[in-house]
Amino acid sequence: MACALKTYALKLTKDKSGSTGGSRTAPTPTAESVKSRAESTRVLNLRELLFLVLSLAFWVSMMTVAGCAERQLTAPTPQMDAAEPFWIRVLLAENLTNCTLKVPSSFSVTNTHTQTAQAHFDQVDVPINVTISAGRITIAGRAFRGNEVIILPHDPYIFNVNGDDYRGKLKLTVNPDGDSFEVVNVVPLEPYLAGVVGAEMPDYWQPAALAAQAVAARTYCLYIKRRFGSKRRWDVRQTAANQVYLGCIAESAKIWEAVNRTYGRVLVCKHPNGSEDIFPAYYCSTCGGHTENSKHVFGDSFQPLRGVRCPYCKDVAKLSSFFWPMAEFDKAKVSTALLQRYPKLKQLAPGGRGEITSITGATYCVSMEMKMCTK
Ligand SMILES: [Zn+2]
């Protein structure tokens, strides 16, 4: 398209000057040159017509494609009236000083403490600058009271932050330093799962695999939310630290089909107290031929999470993922790294002089046992 435009512009310049640009003097018009120009103009008009027809065809096709994408993207977000336990708070960014917000609908801004709408914005699809100023969240130059605001897009409940589309609401919280803020996507469970399943598994995989992924992801995030969510301002990260969540871009008809087909379905197991309940349904892309007992990795023990042999991934996994090289750990280096990562370990010993005295590897995994020196 750009090439066609460029060619057309050059042709116009040449015809207008009557030369190829070698002389700045306008040639004296002759009968031939006038006739030639008239023919040239007719040719140009035909070309122009052709160009316009092609342009029109091009833009109609582009608008059709964009329209399809738009229709898929703006499918209404389900469950916006779900109860609080069925919303997931996904941490998108922790220490921002500014971000760009774009909403394809009008939206309102609410103070989470007063639960009252503080402002209504009608700037549809316009990039809006969000910053922090004097400890306050500032949206399009307007500062908001309190240390936390919720941005609620109106139907179809979609917003774009720093170039990525998400469903639900956007929560902005001022960090204790007062100089930066945290960005959290508060999203109903099922739209959250659509953004996870499509990120964790290609949508051309078998429907049964996608459904299994949806059930595992639903179980995992509900468990993590319940276990850790009450102690922090978010439930899960959007990375593999929990499970990968990419928002709208991960969605497709097949992904939504897997999420909807398994609606409300979770995995449960018997817990030590005799109850039947959800558990952290960990999953991974490649297990290396044998899954590890979760007790050795995360310290939590659940009957379905014992290590089992896996005959599947050796035939499909990348060799570099299936076979890991031997890992060797130097006690001094591990001790230093651990104490740097967890400085409170030092304080466990009397006098605050703890050190790691023993590191023991376990079969199939890299977990270690540590004993603190009490000298
Ligand atoms: Zn496997």
Image (cartoon, rainbow, N blue to C red):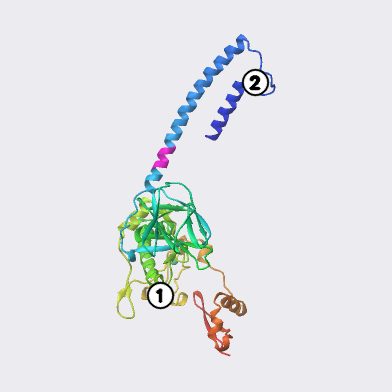
User: Where residue 295 sits: x, y (%)?
Assistant: 43, 77
Q: Observer-nearest residue: 331 or 75?
A: 75
Task: Report how many numbered discs are placed on residues in the image.
Answer: 2
Q: Which residues are magenta?
A: 62-67
Find residue 22 and report its image quarter: top right
- Numbered circle sitting on residue 162: none
Q: Observer-nearest residue: 162 or 257?
A: 162
* Residue density around tag 2, few if under 14, some if 14–19, many if 20 or more, within 10 Å: some
Q: Residue type at mark 1?
A: Arg
Distance between mark 1 and mark 2 Cα atoms: 83 Å
Residue located beneath label 1 in the image: 306
Callout 1: SS: loop
Note whether residue 118 is visible: yes
Q: Are marks 1 and 2 in contact (CB under 8 Å)?
A: no
User: Where residue 127 sits: x, y (%)?
Assistant: 48, 48
Query: Quick one: label 1 or label 2, which is nearer the N terminus?
Result: 2
Q: Observer-nearest residue: 75 or 200?
A: 75
Q: Residue type at mark 2?
A: Ser
Q: Residue at x 49, y 77 (%)?
A: 363
Residue located beneath label 2 in the image: 19
On the rendered structure, is 202 left or right of 345?
Answer: left
Tell me if residue 209 comes above or below residue 63 in the rendering: below
On the rendered structure, is 154 left or right of 4?
Answer: left
User: Where residue 213 sits: x, y (%)?
Assistant: 38, 61
Callout 2: SS: loop
Looking at the rendered image, the quarter that the C terminus falls into is bottom right
Find residue 70 and report its image quarter: top left
User: Where residue 355 sits: x, y (%)?
Assistant: 58, 84
Tell me if residue 215 comes above or below residue 339 in the rendering: above
Q: Is residue 304 magenta?
A: no
Q: Residue at x 38, y 67 (%)?
A: 220
